[in-house]
Image (cartoon, coloured by chain):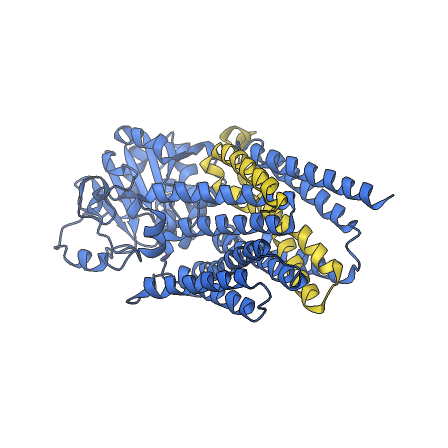
Chain colours: A blue, B yellow
């Protein structure tokens, strides 16, 4: 076979891969076809990888096959992690993707130093900067989610000026390289500066903002791959990168809307600093509390119950106990549904995955916009480990830092029960007036133990 | 401006629109698997990494290429494995009873 004909076969394999990738995402529109989507993606990826191994440019296989085996050896355990570890695994995979894109861009610079044009230099520099900052930024995000690093925002005075100066330095070095592409000394400095910027970018961001940050990093990782496609003139990379980039971008927009905040506010707003003082100013108010027995009595007398899960449920690993609660209430003829706020948890869709893992049917998991109209007809709203997403101050109190954020209207339910460790304000330090309403009962305790106690009471009741 | 750039820009813009239209329809229920699946698809950069590593031009580019192959292939394998595991867990009320 002549080399030209072979090249055409390779191109056909890549085109087939691109078609399968788009179908793969198309199948994801419904849970019933979603697994076919994975299959389509796998076939497309396998086709592209195998075709590439036949590329005549591949002169030796040792340093291709060994890394492939290592990659599989790392990837399979990372695919088998527990569902509660999915957010940090996702952040880590953004880091790997960005690392890979950055490494290829760097290699491309050193391969072509003599012949690289100014235009190519600009593409490479931009690609390597985005890849590098996404790599370190994602590592910091993964560290925060794994709780190796503190989840609270780390802030200091003049932080934004420092961060933006570092970014400006990286871009300045890129411009200098475009002017003189053969200045090989500047290139590694630019990479290091971009790596530092990635760390500075994510360090100040708190845990509650992680859904947006993960989505943004997802988008950066995608766009760095697309840019790499421009550098290498590889359409399959351009398409895959554009798909991944737009997916991350759409998710970021959804997350920002769900918090009523802008990108710049998330990235440079250092949430959680200002509100500490606001919360301290609140006067003492009376709350009503109840024990598991009382809670069980109220729940079993209800017709319609809506459970609102939040990050606290994930932390307490309470999802399996929640399933038992769902089962025993359903058995008593109570209609139980789950209200899912878009930013509940640490990444988009986090609560859905945890509840699906606990075997709760997905048609019981209802999005915010769909369920909000039903709260006035709901007998009991049971909140497990969620806080800000239920705070009615977002609707009414213009001085609240979360004013304007769309929330779950739990305060419209006939009665509200909140499982919470103590009256300490939540992560963002914002006081929640929901807890002082007449129809609210506070259930103080660990989410897992308290739900377990309610289940036992329900079991003993009949 | 090189001709390649223009044709790549066409592809990028069209793929961006396709991505937007397709991903808009993904149910919020599946946003976590969406992210892990697009991650696995994005790992297609492994094909570029294989060529960089396989060309064996200088020691430096081979090392960089080999790191890129390992990093992106682990994303590819891990991304598909975890997406499938997650999607297997999503059962409707009806299929649960049967």
Pick the front one: B43 or A105: A105
Residue A69 in sight from this viewpoint: yes
Tell which residue pokes out farthest to the right in this image. Answer: A1
Residue B81 position, x and y percent, is 62, 47
Total tally of numbered discs in the picture:
0
Q: In the displayed structure, does residue A431 sit left or right of residue A346?
A: left
User: Is B26 left or right of A431, judged from the image as shown?
Assistant: right
In-image side of A456 versus A184 (left or right): left
Q: Position of residue A40 (x, y in %)?
A: 65, 37
Pick the front one: A140 or A424? A140
Between residues B35 and A192, which one lies in front from this camera angle? A192
Whether residue A270 is situated above or below residue A329 in the rendered picture = below
Q: Residue furthest bottom?
A: A185
Residue A143 visible in the snapshot: no
Q: Residue A293 in the image: x percent, y percent? A: 29, 45
- What is the quadrant of the C terminus of chain B in the image? top right
| Residue A271, quarter of picture | bottom left
Task: Please tell me which residue is depicted at 72% across the width and 55% down the height of the picture.
Answer: B51
Query: Residue A13: x percent and y percent?
Result: 73, 40
Query: What residue lies at 33% left-to-right and 34% top-to-bottom?
Result: A305
Is A20 drawn above or below residue A259 in the view shown? above
């Amino acid at each position: 076979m002549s080399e030209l004909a072979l090249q055409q076969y390779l191109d056909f394999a890549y085109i087939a891969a691109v078609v399968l990738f788009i179908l793969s995402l198309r199948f994801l529109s419904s849970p019933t076809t979603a697994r076919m989507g994975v299959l389509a993606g796998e076939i497309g990826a396998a086709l592209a990888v195998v075709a590439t191994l036949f590329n005549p440019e591949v002169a030796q296989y040792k340093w291709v096959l060994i890394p492939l085996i290592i990659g599989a050896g790392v990837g399979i355990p990372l695919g088998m992690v527990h569902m509660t570890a999915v957010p940090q695994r996702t952040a880590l995979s953004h880091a790997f993707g960005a690392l890979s894109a950055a490494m290829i861009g760097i290699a491309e610079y050193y391969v072509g130093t003599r012949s690289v044009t100014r235009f190519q230099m600009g593409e490479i520099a931009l690609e390597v900067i985005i890849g590098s900052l996404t790599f370190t930024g994602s590592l910091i995000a993964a560290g925060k989610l794994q709780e190796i690093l503190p989840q609270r925002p780390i802030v200091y005075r003049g932080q934004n000026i420092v961060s933006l100066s570092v970014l400006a330095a990286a871009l300045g070095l890129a411009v200098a390289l475009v002017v003189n592409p053969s200045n090989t000394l500047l290139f590694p400095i630019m990479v290091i500066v971009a790596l530092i910027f990635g760390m500075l970018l994510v360090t100040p961001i708190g845990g509650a903002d992680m859904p947006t940050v993960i989505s943004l990093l997802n988008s950066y990782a995608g766009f760095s791959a697309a840019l790499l496609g421009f550098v290498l003139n590889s359409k399959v990379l351009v398409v895959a990168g554009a798909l991944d980039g737009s997916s991350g971008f759409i998710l970021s927009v959804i997350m920002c809307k769900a918090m009523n905040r802008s990108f710049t506010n998330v990235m440079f707003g250092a949430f959680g600093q200002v509100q500490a003082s606001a919360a301290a100013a609140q006067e003492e108010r009376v709350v009503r509390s109840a024990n598991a027995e009382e809670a069980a009595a109220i729940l079993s007398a209800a017709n319609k119950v809506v459970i609102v899960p939040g990050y606290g449920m994930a932390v307490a690993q309470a999802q399996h106990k929640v399933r038992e609660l769902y089962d025993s209430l359903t058995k008593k003829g109570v209609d139980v549904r789950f209200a899912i706020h878009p930013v509940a948890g640490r990444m988009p869709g986090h609560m859905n995955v945890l509840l699906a893992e606990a075997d709760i049917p997905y048609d019981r998991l209802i999005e915010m916009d769909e369920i909000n109209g039903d709260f006035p007809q709901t007998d009991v709203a049971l909140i497990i480990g969620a806080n800000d997403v239920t705070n009615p101050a977002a609707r009414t109190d213009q001085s609240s830092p979360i004013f304007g954020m769309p929330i779950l209207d739990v305060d419209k339910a006939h009665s509200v029960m909140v499982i919470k460790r103590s009256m300490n304000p939540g992560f963002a330090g914002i006081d929640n007036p929901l807890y002082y309403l007449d129809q609210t009962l506070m259930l103080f305790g660990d989410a897992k133990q308290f739900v377990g106690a309610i289940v036992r009471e329900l079991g003993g009741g009949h | 401006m090189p001709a390649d750039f223009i044709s790549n820009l066409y592809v990028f813009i069209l793929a961006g629109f396709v991505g937007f239209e397709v991903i808009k329809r993904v149910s919020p229920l599946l946003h976590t698997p969406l992210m892990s699946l697009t991650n696995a698809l994005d790992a297609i950069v492994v094909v570029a990494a294989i060529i960089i590593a396989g060309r064996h031009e200088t020691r430096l580019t081979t090392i960089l290429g080999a790191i890129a192959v390992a990093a992106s292939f682990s994303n590819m394998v891990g991304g598909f494995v975890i997406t499938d595991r997650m999607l297997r867990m999503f059962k409707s009320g009806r299929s649960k009873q049967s």
